[in-house]
């Protein structure tokens, strides 16, 4: 149902009942829909949102940011009574022979002890596979230090990519989902 406003008058067009085609054409012209329809290559895709600019990457990142927030809350709760620990976010001060910003770094007595990366995957794809491979490389760089790398990852996307997760687990010391982290964080500290 649309409302057409014209000099303090309006007309309701109900598309679920019989309607005047002239009203629809007039509405489409005045709102710019007619021009839009001539420029869209795939109207179906546009109307379902894939071309409209809903920014699917931002939508994906939103779930990742939410996941990071709940992990941060859990880490802060775990160290609240441990004054020797300090938690930093988006820390790029760790020198491991590459420029890397960690989601979280847990310092013990002023020294970096645990380096955390968090990822949440609600779907499958190449990104989780690339991330797993990058974190295997990162683990290799951290192996000869006093620090521990912990990859916290979760989401339904891993159900169909279990072999990738299993392979990463063979090369990365700590691959945890949220529940494992929640139940075992005190064993690490």
Image (cartoon, rainbow, N blue to C red):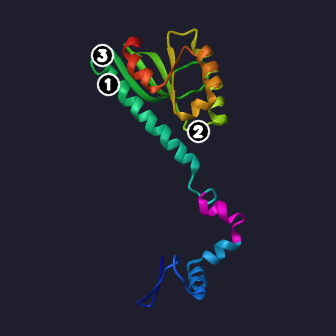
Outermost residue on the right side: it is 41
Task: Work out whether residue 40 or residue 11 is closer to the camera in this orientation and state it.
Answer: 11
User: Residue 33: in sight, yes or no?
Assistant: yes
Task: Work out whether residue 16 or residue 55 is closer to the camera in this orientation and state it.
Answer: 16
The residue identified by callout 1 is 77
At x 70%, y 63%, the residue is 42
Disc 1 and disc 2 in contact, CB within 8 angstroms: no
Whichever of callouts 3 and 1 sits on the residue coming sooner in the sequence is: 1
Q: Which mark is residue 57?
A: none
At x 45%, y 33%, the residue is 68
Disc 2 and disc 3 in contact, CB within 8 angstroms: no
Residue 157 part of the magenta segment: no
Q: Secondary structure at mark 1?
A: helix
Label 1, label 2: how far apart the Cα atoms are: 29 Å
The x and y percentages for residue 99 are 59, 26
Residue 40 part of the magenta segment: yes
154 displayed left or right of 163: left
At x 41%, y 27%, the residue is 88
Q: Main secondary structure of the magenta part?
A: helix
* Label 3 crowd (10 A; few <14 / some 14-19 / many >=20): few
The residue identified by callout 3 is 82
Label 3, label 1: how far apart the Cα atoms are: 10 Å
Whichever of callouts 2 and 3 sits on the residue coming sooner in the sequence is: 3
Label 2, label 3: how far apart the Cα atoms are: 37 Å
40 displayed left or right of 18: right
Segment tinted magenta in the rendering: 39-49
Q: Nearer the viewer, mark 1 or mark 2?
A: 2
User: Residue 92: in sight, yes or no?
Assistant: no
At x 58%, y 46%, the residue is 57
Q: Which mark is residue 123?
A: 2
Q: How many marks?
A: 3
């Amino acid at each position: 149902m649309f409302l057409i406003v014209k000099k303090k008058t309006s007309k309701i067009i109900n598309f679920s009942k019989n309607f005047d085609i002239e009203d629809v054409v007039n509405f489409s012209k005045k709102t710019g829909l007619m021009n839009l329809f001539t420029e869209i290559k795939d109207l179906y895709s546009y109307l379902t949102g894939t071309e409209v600019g809903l920014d699917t990457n931002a939508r994906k990142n939103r779930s990742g940011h939410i996941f990071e927030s709940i992990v941060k809350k859990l880490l802060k709760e775990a160290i609240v009574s441990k004054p020797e620990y300090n938690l930093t976010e988006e820390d790029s001060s760790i020198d491991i022979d590459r420029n890397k910003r960690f989601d979280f770094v847990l310092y013990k007595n002023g020294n970096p002890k645990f380096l955390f990366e968090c990822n949440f995957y609600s779907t499958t794809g190449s990104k989780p596979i690339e991330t797993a491979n990058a974190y295997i490389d990162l683990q290799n760089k951290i192996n000869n230090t006093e620090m521990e790398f912990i990859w916290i990852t979760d989401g339904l996307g891993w159900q169909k990519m279990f072999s990738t997760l299993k392979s990463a687990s063979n090369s990365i010391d700590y691959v945890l989902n949220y529940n494992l982290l929640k139940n075992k964080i005190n064993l690490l500290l």
